[in-house]
Image (tube, rainbow, N blue to C red):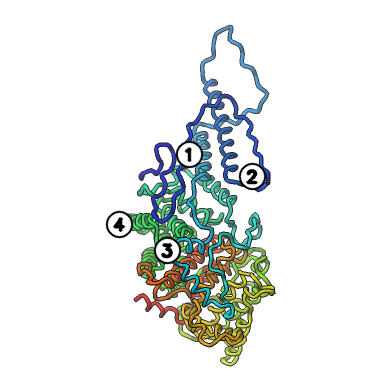
Amino acid sequence: MSTNVEGEDGGHVPSTSTSNPQSPARTRRRARKRNGPPQLQFLTATDPSQFKDESVKRSVRSQAMIQYRYQESEQKHKTKDAHAPRSTRKDEKAPVKQDRLTPVLLNDNARVYQSAQDAFLTQWLEEPQEPVYGTTSEAWWSANPNASNLARERSFTSTSGWGVGGLSLVPYATPPVPMQSSGYGNRVIRYEDTDAHDEELLRIIVATVKSSQRMGNGMDPFVVIPQFKCPELNAVRLVRNCNRAFSSKSTLEKWLPVMLSDPHILLSSTLMATTWLDMHAGVCGESKRTVLLKQEAISYINERLRDSRAMEDSTLAVIIHVLAGEMWSCNEKTLRIHEEGVARLIAHRGGMSQLGGYGVVAQVAAAVTSHCDLICEATPLPIFYQWEPPNFAVDEMVAVPESPLYCPRGEFVTARQDRGCSEITHELLCDMRDLTDLFIAHNAAFDTVLDVETYPHDAQHGPSLVEYEARLAEFRAKLASLPSAHVLGLPTTHDWVYESCRIAAIIYASAVIMRVPLSAAADPGRNIIMRDIASLTGSFAGEEVFAPRLTETLYEVIEHTNIGDLWNNMSGVFYWVNTVGAAAARTSVNIDFYERPTCANDAYATWVRRCLIMFATRAMILILFEHPLPLIMAEKKLLKVQELLGSGSSRRLIS
């Protein structure tokens, strides 16, 4: 077993990351001996919301543990007395019988497990969390004190006349759109960014551990959470953060058995968690914790490739985790190396169909590598674009991740019912869906390597050139006429979900109309729809040269939305918006993490791309385990669009 990170007093040694401030160490109080049953403890509050405070929750959990331990102690005494020889003294009084329910006796192993399980739950829930900023924008501006000049420059150049500017570039902590707890219901993803959801997932983990064969001898659940070799890495804290940000009930149902099968899989999966914490702490590069974790994960791969585990699914899972965790760095050369490693391993196994997990491993490999190609505007490797996901029927009663890339029913049934999808947003999404299908149908005769499935509402035959150009002109004019959410007195005023979709659509549609990569269309000076907006608003000629990239404005608008819950039943749209933004944010200065930006503008552009990548990657992971095939079909469709745009050739930037 590797080095444990627990101190002598039972507390956890905090991470020594130099990039993030550490929570103050909690002093462990000396336990005092209690005689008799625990007394009642009353909680008082002046407002009902105070009962949700962390201190109150901790007090309740502590009292529950005291009660349990008292009952367990009493049960041990009873068991001991039952096995002790009877006294023969005549003057000994018979024990007084009590009118109370007798608890069900547990065998020793079960009692040991139950006690450890409760301790595990308590420590997990009370594990101190790192202080992080409320939003990534707040993290950026707080961690970059010299960014005030950049803010003034952007406030001067980002005019509302362009229909995309006007956001106040000051830190803020709370998105204006409140989050509602729905108890899942008919949700696209069984996920909520809440404490209750976190505790529910923890109980699933404990139940899975309990039912595993290894727990038959009363093994402590803490043993199931393996420890890193590096004592500076806190496994419990990282696993919990990974669980909180990247796991749904479906994630645990499908992927937890795989992770528990090998310590390397579970530990390597926390790479996403540490980069997520880096983002929310305003770390522009990588924290010490992330560097240490990445080094250890790479050592797992090298170790496994040298022994009999080289061809196992577990080795493939570790490489996929490292690939996903590397996306934050924006180092496209490194990403391609990991992707090629995944492809070679699958080829040695005999192809995607030979992978285990009843198709889960193949689906995860396809989704993660396709996502990597999307954000890098790269052509997929042959083993992935040649793989076709199995056919499946869409249940009319099931919520699916609809988007302009995936709309199997012909209408946005799921997204339309979400409270964040206004009528004008719905019309905009329909236009982008129709534009996507029109573009692919018109270019069907081109010799391309990728193929996608068409939907019933797609045209049976490609449109003529005249029809095609007429439709493009229609989409272009309609999009240019849409009002900005910054314009007051309109139904769209301060509708940031609508505004996010509008800006993403400006980038996406302009790329399709001009047939240029998304990264080129994000330049205001090259965006044809931005020119149309300028002519409609009367902006002076050449103003677009000084405007910020559209991806920076898109990021700032997305920050005003509820990122935590992925826009609820618009999660498929959320993925489309952020993936388009992440791909469009590529520039020659932010495709390699190790090339430090030379000016504030380049540093901010790099930060924007990393955040958009993280938003999109998190959405991909959460959707993947709930709706793997719809996600993969959406990815394949966007890859097809990027191929037709010539995005694959943009890799010359990193050659």
Q: Going from the N terminus, do you reach mark 4 or mark 3 first? A: 3
SS state under label 3: loop
As drawn, the label of residue 51 is 2
As drawn, the label of residue 284 is 3
Q: State whether residue 281 appears in this view.
A: yes
Q: Give the Cα separation between the discs numbered 3 and 1.
A: 46 Å
SS state under label 2: helix
Which amino acid type corresponds to the residue marked 4 in the rendered image?
Arg
Q: Is residue 341 above or below residue 124?
A: below
Q: Residue furthest bottom?
A: 466
Disc 4 target residue: 306
Which amino acid type corresponds to the residue marked 3 in the rendered image?
Cys
Disc 1 target residue: 216
Which amino acid type corresponds to the residue marked 2 in the rendered image?
Phe
261 left or right, relative to 512? left
Query: Of the residues tagged 2 and 4, which is closer to the observer?
Result: 2
Q: Residue furthest left?
A: 306
Give x and y (percent) for residue 101: 65, 28
Query: Of the residues tagged 3 and 1, which is closer to the observer?
Result: 3
Which amino acid type corresponds to the residue marked 1 in the rendered image?
Gly
Which residue shows up at 42% across the image and 72% down it? 602
How many other residues sit within 10 Å of disc 3, few (<14), some (14-19) or many (≥20)? many
How many other residues sit within 10 Å of disc 4, few (<14), some (14-19) or many (≥20)? few
SS state under label 4: loop
Q: Going from the N terminus, do you reach mark 4 or mark 1 first? A: 1
Which residue shows up at 67% across the image and 65% down it? 419
Q: Nearer the viewer, residue 490 or 311?
A: 490
